[in-house]
Image: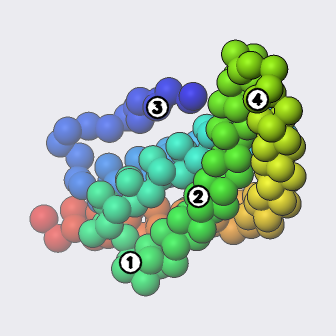
Amino acid sequence: MARARVVEGLECDQPFALAGAHVVAFRGAEVIEHSRDVLDVDDIERVHDMRVATRRLRAAMEIFAPCFPRKQLRATLKEVKVIADALGERRDRDVAIEQLESFIERAGASDRAGVADLVETLRAEQAVANERLVPFVTADRLEALRTNLAELVEAAWAAAAEAEAVR
């Protein structure tokens, strides 16, 4: 699993909106970064890492919600949730297959065939879940997410600059 990277550059005396912009930009970049080769079923950690990255981004967006325009935030958060759900569908099969394959090694001969059949069924479901994931991780869709996040970040920067000017 990808360990959470520390968001560098945060200062305890900086405005909340600037911190929010910084964290959301950082966590959004992680989602995009982890999308590389996410459809590769031979490396199930890629899906896991991207899914975890979406959860971190979602948490950051929810924590810093007051920093962003409400309507824009809701739409972008919804998109992050939809991507996470699609990743979760694929991840569920990955984990089940991994566990059952480990179990087959320890299972008695009479159980192996049945477990192997179940693994094959899950592999078919994994393939379907992977196909359903495709539209959520296309370059265009991820670029749209990146653009939406950039707009949120820009709005938070603008709000922070405006608040600072009023001081």
Residue drawn at x 32%, y 49% as measured from the top left: 19
Mark 3: give few (<14), some (14-19) or many (20+) Cα within 10 Å. few
Q: Are marks 3 and 1 in contact (CB under 8 Å)?
A: no
Q: Quadrant of the C terminus?
A: bottom left
- Which amino acid type is shown beneath numbered disc 3? Ala
**Residue linked to disc 3:** 4
Q: Secondary structure at mark 2?
A: helix
Direction from residue 30 to residue 63 in the image, left or right? left
Q: Are marks 4 and 3 in contact (CB under 8 Å)?
A: no
Mark 1: give few (<14), some (14-19) or many (20+) Cα within 10 Å. some
Q: How many marks?
A: 4
Mark 2: give few (<14), some (14-19) or many (20+) Cα within 10 Å. many
Residue drawn at x 41%, y 35% as measured from the top left: 7
Q: CA distance from mark 3 to mark 1?
A: 27 Å
Q: Nearer the viewer, residue 35 or 153?
A: 35
- Which amino acid type is shown beneath numbered disc 1? Pro
Task: Give the number of the mark in front: 4 or 2.
Answer: 4
Q: Are marks 4 and 2 in contact (CB under 8 Å)?
A: no
